[in-house]
Amino acid sequence: MEKILFLILAGGRGTRLTPLTDNCPKPLVRFGFSKRLIDFTLYNCLISSAYKIILLTQYLSEMIEQYIPEFWKPVFEMQGKTLRVTRSDDSRNKFFSGTADAVYQTLSDTISLPRFVVVLAADHIYRMDYRSLVRFHIRHGKIATVGAVPCDRDQAHRFGIINCEQDGTIQTFHEKPRSLDSIVPPNLHPLASMGIYVFSTEPLLEYLETNQRKTSNDLGKDVLPDMVESHDASVFPFLGPDGERSYWRDVGELSFFREATKEYIDGQYKRLQFDHLPGMIQLPSNSSPCVKPGAGRYRAV
């Protein structure tokens, strides 16, 4: 995993989680008993032997910059791995105009390009070892691999919906369709993109450079459809050992955040609990979701 760069997209304002994000970046919103949203993705990186991880931030970046060194950087460093935060105002354009632009600016400023790039979100609740995802990507030889889960039909409008060929090549991609008519047969569950990607770096850069000339710079909405049209993307179904649907929740909207919180408290925490690793300290458990900028050190008391 040394030749892989992990990028965690953690810059969104999170308006759909208002009021939780009024004075708090979305990745640091509290979830469950003592965790924050971003903790689940960071723990997945740990158990996946990820060596280099960069958080791309924009909204209230200073809070994330305080949290990461205190609660996560030590455990990564004890395992010989690097974890750092990159703010949008440290980039050449001083602003990320979208997820594709954030990835493009980061790679453009990287001296030694990795062979692969794994792009993750900071507001998903799940447990995954990304090594299986990377192995799948290498085996299928496409430019992009998209993690996906079956979803209920009445939830399909929230996600990018994938149709694929028998070998896993993505045939069509519909971003948040209003209707599944002519997209998914009525007797099947739609296959929803998780917003988790593995890319082969050099060809990815070619797509990102083309996207820079457009007004919209979103990976899922703009870049991925171009790859699908060129038959350059495969789907990785995120399933359990018996082929059942694995637990994954996108909690970027308040109603789904509340639903996932209830599921977590009602028993999902047993599946998602963290094993204690060297360097890992107790995560904070005070009731306040965040502290306001300038209110002092970001630490539970």
Image: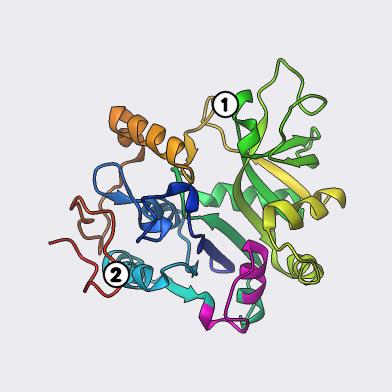
Query: Residue 214, image x and y in percent?
Result: 79, 67
**On screen, 12 above or below 167?**
below
Q: Which residue is nearer to you in this view: 274 or 98?
A: 98
Q: Are marks 1 and 2 in contact (CB under 8 Å)?
A: no
Horizontal side, residue 210 vs residue 285: left or right: right
Name the quadrant of the C terminus: bottom left
Q: CA distance from mark 1 to mark 2?
A: 36 Å
Name the quadrant of the N terminus: bottom right
Secondary structure under tag 1 reads: loop
Q: Which mark is residue 243?
A: 1
Residue with the mark numbered 2: 74
- Render colour scheme: rainbow
Query: Residue 200, image x and y in percent?
Result: 71, 62
Q: Look at the image and say whether residue 93 sits in the magenta stretch.
A: yes
Q: Residue furthest left?
A: 301
**Segment colored magenta:** 89-105
Q: Which mark is residue 4?
A: none
Neighbourhood count class around disc 2 (C-alpha, 10 Å): few under 14, some 14–19, many 20 upward: some
Q: Which residue is nearer to you in this view: 133 or 150?
A: 150
Residue under the point 58% across and 75% down? 95
Residue under the point 21% across and 60% down? 281
- Amino acid marked by disc 2: Pro
**On screen, 199 above or below 172?**
below
Residue under the point 82% across and 69% down? 210
Neighbourhood count class around disc 1 (C-alpha, 10 Å): few under 14, some 14–19, many 20 upward: few
Query: Residue 31, image x and y in percent?
Result: 32, 45
Query: Residue 45, image x and y in percent?
Result: 45, 57
Secondary structure under tag 2 reads: helix
Q: Give the number of callouts.
A: 2
Q: Earlier in the sequence, mark 1 or mark 2?
A: 2
- Amino acid marked by disc 1: Gly
